[in-house]
Amino acid sequence: MTKPLFEQQFSRRTMLRSSLLLGAGLAVGSAAGCATPTGTPGPTTVSLALNRSLVSLDNKLNQFDAAVTVQRGVRQALTEIDQTLRPRLVLADQFKLTSPTQWYVHLRPGVRYSDGSPVQVEDIATALKMYSEVDGSFVAGFFPEFPTVEKIDETSLTLNTERPLPVLDYLMSNILITPATKNAPEELQSGVGTGPYVVTESNRGAGTYTLVRNDKYWGTPTHVESVRVRFMPDETSRVVALRSGEIDVIDSITPDSADQLAGLSGVSIDRVDGVRLNQLFFNFRKPPNHPLADARVRRALTYAIDGPSLTDHVLQGSASTPRGIIPQTLDGAIETGEYTYDPQRARAQLDALGVRDLNLKIIWESGEFAADTDIMESVVQMLGAVGVQARLQQFEPGGDISQWRQGKGGDWDVLGNGYPSPTGLALTIMQGMYAGTAEKEKTRDTYHGYIFPEITAIITEASEEPDPTRRNTLLADAQRRIWDTCPMLWSFVPKAVLARRNRIDGIALRPTNSYDLTAVSLHI
């Protein structure tokens, strides 16, 4: 009988250690032989290796956590969410609520794009329009409605909404500003921004970018002259590249890799409690007669998953299982229940519901979370132990999984996915995941078909409530109702983890698994 993957820790760790030693020797040898485009970074360059391909320096459709660091090195928003998960002014020097449906915004004096042109009120209006019009927008899901812009003068405006939106200062941190004439309702591959860096080279297919210090940057000049971004999906390759000095910073690594690197001279590991929800989410686009359309069946399946073994052995304590439908670290989150491992109960309940010979297709994209393949293969074994057959379909980064997520590419039953909380608010992630409507579903902009009108109504009411206490009361009610619908087979909240060479300083890793490139410096 094959052992579950979470019982094979020694072999996995030994294999990684061997790869590190062999790979480091090869990397050092090749670096010593000659300088190449992928050799060690120069004394004024920082080299980043991402586990997922950065297909755009714009975030309309793609905002996985680590991408935020690079994207905001080129483009900025009126506000940003800081290390304490609170909004901080960036392109605006005033952002204040003047009435329940209106915010006053004043643009910071002297802010200019990398081409020397000033930021204009029209750029804000166009950015909001482009984010609202792009098909399959990731950011749009966070907004109950997009505000309209009313120009006061060349540097002042109001953001107006039909209904109250008391957290708009948080939400606007997701709207990156581009000159109106150079924006479009699509992902932007290059272009002009207000950030501390400009793009000098880009290859979307390869996921490689070179950023160089913006000499016209309106803020404090960066300490680092250039940033080189590379896509390295294989974790062992990333670890070896860091160890050899070819790469300065890597993120989203497994505990095995972190443990191996922690004892090395010249390498540091940074960790912080994260706010990303990684989940195995059910497909809510199933017809009414499908077993997964029944919440009782979904709940019965959750009993088959040994969450503690996955978090303790596969993830080795680098993640926690939330006692609810969102991370408990978010402002407004409550405990609604916890996943229970009871395979006998799972089989008994499935039998009582007449569910036999159930076959499930589980899909995910490589690199969606650390140890993704180990987790998925273990889940298949756990489901098999209660008589449920499951098969896996893994998508490579940059593939067409987005079409599948929207129900346009093919059918599936469970999706392995990560959902960020870029504002640190329970309201934002709930708006994006659980406030689906029939109107949104027409364009496949719900979260995998999750539509419960009574839940959406409560979340919408909470989004309009100016009183934080009353807002959290409404959100608590919605969270309890969502838990009862059993939207996920299992979920976990990973710590944000990165490894860096000690020549890199100033990285203040945020719970959003990102950091401010302007603060990064080099020990030369």
Image: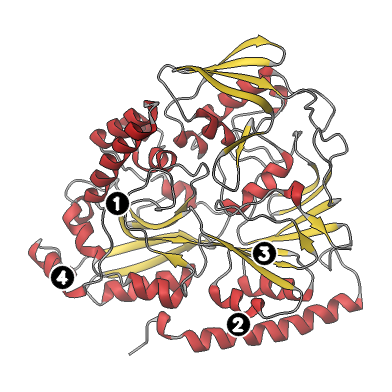
Measured as percent of width and height from the top left, residue 37 is found at: 85, 63
Tell whether 423 sits left or right of 107: left
Q: Are marks 1 and 3 in contact (CB under 8 Å)?
A: no
Q: Are marks 1 and 4 in contact (CB under 8 Å)?
A: no
Badge 2 or badge 3: first in the primary sequence: 2
Mark linked to residue 250: 3
- CA separation, marks 4 and 2? 37 Å
Badge 4 or badge 3: first in the primary sequence: 3
Q: Secondary structure at mark 2?
A: helix
Give the labeled residue for mark 4: 345
- CA separation, marks 2 and 3? 16 Å
Give the labeled residue for mark 2: 16
Q: Are marks 4 and 2 in contact (CB under 8 Å)?
A: no
- CA separation, marks 1 and 3? 32 Å
Residue at the (18%, 52%) spot, across then down? 294
Residue at the (41%, 71%) spot, across then down? 311
Badge 1 or badge 3: first in the primary sequence: 3
- The quarter of the rendered structure image containing the N terminus is bottom left
Give the labeled residue for mark 1: 487
Measured as percent of width and height from the top left, residue 14 is found at: 57, 88
Q: Secondary structure at mark 1?
A: loop
Dot 4 amino acid type: Arg
Badge 4 or badge 2: first in the primary sequence: 2
Dot 2 amino acid type: Leu
Tell whether 80 sits left or right of 21: left
